[in-house]
């Protein structure tokens, strides 16, 4: 049986025919020895056809389809044109060697060509890859390397498809920076307290919060200048008028030493720097919350934004966290304790970073391990939904949180929780209903817009015109007014003519009536005269 080899290079498809395999035998070691020598390998493998790609985009599309195990139309036409034809109902008398088994199965399903991809074929293709530039005669030195580099860059760019709004690296950097800022703000605040306590030692016992202490120190500056005028400003900062009065009274009887103006300026500048860091920490926390709601909304709604971000950063990415089983997620962050317990054969830790969740703190001492195991199970489900779902929603996270709450009640009061199947079914139904509502919303808006367009009257049309068309509309309106005036004048003229015609008809009618009266009078006179003549004759 003849053997053909399909090689997908960066510049095009190439088809080779392997001859003289009986001499070498189906032995991979013999093929490995013959691959290095071009003279020996060239006698076994010969080029039969080569079809270059039309463009770089075409090469990228072909490479993507081959990596996915799909045969394109160009590859099918290339194989049908250069391979011997297979009669219907009969097996092919040759086989095609392919590097990708998925691609081979797809080719055999569609074209009925038997394909193979074993170690023997892979060794032959390795030799083809090694001496490919020698088989193509018109290929210039360096062209193949350029094509490989360009296709590698474009293929990598296409494979690294990611949504900008779902980059978990931003969450990792933000949570690291948040932890660093917490440490720095605490140490800097202690330095402000120690520094300003030389001047005003009583203020430490009155104001406990670090941020508020820095603000008060920035406001007071020199304690000797404290008076009742500072009470409203201190009340605005502290939110307590009694504390503000207490600070003013303590300032009057303070035991601290006086500082020079230069020392006070340095203290004020450092206090301002601590305040700026605290403000930046608040903004960074808000940024972390928004990013977590975009990247892992279900995990954030289940366990909180900060704990979820710490889990993602410790795992390395959201994908790595989704790949972790719940048992690994449970002790994530307690690796030292785990290996120490394994080394000393002691008790393994029950929880790691997940301990910072409020659920484990609310559980009793004997149920903390159970609660950690159950919460890790739900966190792994939420992370997988966030990682592999196309649309982000908090429905599953809220339902999983409800399950954890029910489990807490079960441990405390013995109330039986709902089954996981029922909860997931309800979550799926709610997501489907939301999708239906989202699909119906644009259609409803479009119908309302159409109805509004139909309801617009021609009289209101000029009002909806833009500012750019105002002059044209004014000119048209003036022309319409002139036409209407002309029509009115013509109608008045026609009305006058009609009224004149009516008056003429009335006059004519009056004239005919008078004529008729005269005729009747003449006829009556004539009749009376004839009667008189008759009587006189008699």
Image (tube, rainbow, N blue to C red):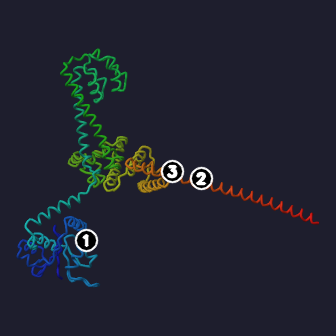
Q: Nearer the viewer, residue 472 or 371?
A: 472
Q: CA distance from mark 3 to mark 2?
A: 17 Å
Between 159 and 141, which is closer to the camera in this rendering? 141
Between tags 1 and 2, which lies in front?
2
- Give the mark nearest the N terminus, 3 or 2: 3
Q: Hey, which residue is sitting farthest front in the picture? A: 537
**Which SS class for mark 3?**
helix
Q: Earlier in the sequence, mark 1 or mark 2?
A: 1
Secondary structure of the residue carrying tag 1 is loop
Q: Quadrant of the N terminus?
A: bottom left
Q: Is residue 362 visible?
A: yes
Q: Residues within 10 Å of mark 1 (few under 14, many from 20)?
A: some
On the image, the x and y values in percent for residue 312 come to: 27, 48
* Residue bearing the label numbered 3: 485
Q: Residue 412 vs residue 33: left or right?
A: right
The reply to whether discs 3 and 1 touch (Cβ–Cβ < 8 Å) is no
Tell me if residue 315 comes above or below residue 115 in the rendering.
Answer: above
Q: Earlier in the sequence, mark 3 or mark 1?
A: 1
Residue 253 image-quadrant placement: top left
The image shows residue 181 at horizontal and vertical percentages of 24, 37
Look at mark 2 in the image and give the residue it sits on.
Answer: 496
Q: Residue at x 16, y 67 (%)?
A: 10
């Amino acid at each position: 049986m003849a053997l053909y080899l399909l090689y997908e290079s960066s510049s095009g498809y190439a088809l080779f025919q392997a001859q003289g395999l009986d001499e070498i035998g189906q032995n991979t070691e013999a093929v490995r020895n013959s691959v290095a020598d071009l003279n020996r390998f060239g006698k076994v493998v010969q080029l039969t056809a080569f079809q270059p790609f039309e463009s770089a985009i075409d090469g990228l599309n072909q490479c993507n389809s081959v990596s996915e195990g799909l045969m394109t139309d160009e590859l099918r036409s290339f194989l049908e044109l250069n391979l011997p034809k297979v009669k219907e109902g009969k097996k092919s008398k040759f086989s095609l060697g392919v590097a990708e088994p998925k691609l081979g199965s797809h080719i055999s399903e569609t074209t009925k060509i038997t394909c193979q991809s074993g170690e023997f074929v892979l060794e032959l293709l390795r030799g083809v890859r090694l001496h490919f530039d020698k088989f193509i005669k018109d290929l210039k030195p360096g062209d193949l390397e350029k094509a490989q580099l360009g296709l590698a860059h474009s293929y990598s760019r296409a494979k690294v498809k990611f949504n900008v709004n779902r980059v978990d690296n931003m969450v990792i950097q933000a949570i690291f920076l948040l932890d660093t800022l917490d440490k720095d703000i605490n140490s800097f605040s202690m330095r402000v307290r120690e520094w300003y306590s030389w001047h005003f030692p009583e203020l430490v016992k009155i104001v406990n919060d670090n941020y508020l202490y820095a603000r008060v120190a920035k406001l007071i500056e020199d304690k000797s200048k404290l008076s009742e005028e500072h009470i409203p400003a201190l009340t605005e900062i502290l939110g307590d008028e009694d504390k503000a009065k207490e600070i003013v009274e303590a300032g009057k009887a303070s035991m601290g030493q006086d500082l020079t103006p230069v020392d006070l300026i340095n203290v004020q500048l450092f206090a301002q720097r601590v305040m700026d860091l605290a403000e930046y920490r608040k903004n960074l926390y808000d940024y972390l919350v928004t990013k977590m709601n975009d990247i892992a909304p279900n995990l954030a709604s289940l366990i909180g934004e900060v704990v979820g971000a710490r889990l993602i950063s410790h795992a390395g990415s959201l994908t790595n966290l989704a790949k972790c089983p719940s048992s690994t997620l449970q002790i994530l962050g307690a690796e030292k304790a785990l290996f120490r317990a394994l080394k000393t054969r002691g008790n393994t830790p029950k929880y790691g970073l997940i301990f910072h969740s409020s659920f484990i703190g609310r559980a009793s001492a004997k149920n903390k391990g159970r609660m950690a195991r159950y919460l890790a199970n739900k966190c792994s489900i939420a992370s997988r939904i966030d990682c592999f779902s196309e649309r982000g929603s908090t429905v599953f996270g809220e339902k999983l949180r409800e399950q954890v709450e029910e489990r807490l009640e079960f441990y405390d009061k013995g109330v039986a929780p709902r089954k996981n199947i029922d909860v997931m079914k309800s979550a799926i139904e709610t997501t489907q209903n939301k999708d239906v509502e989202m699909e119906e919303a644009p259609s409803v808006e479009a119908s309302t817009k159409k109805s509004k367009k139909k309801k617009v009257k021609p009289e209101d049309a000029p009002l909806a015109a833009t500012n750019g068309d105002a002059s044209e509309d004014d000119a048209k309106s003036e022309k319409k007014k002139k036409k209407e005036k002309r029509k009115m004048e013509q109608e008045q003229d026609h009305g006058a003519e009609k009224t004149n015609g009516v008056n003429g008809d009335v006059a004519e009618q009056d004239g005919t009536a008078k004529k008729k009266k005269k005729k009747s009078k003449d006829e009556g006179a004539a009749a009376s005269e004839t009667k008189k003549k008759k009587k006189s004759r008699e």
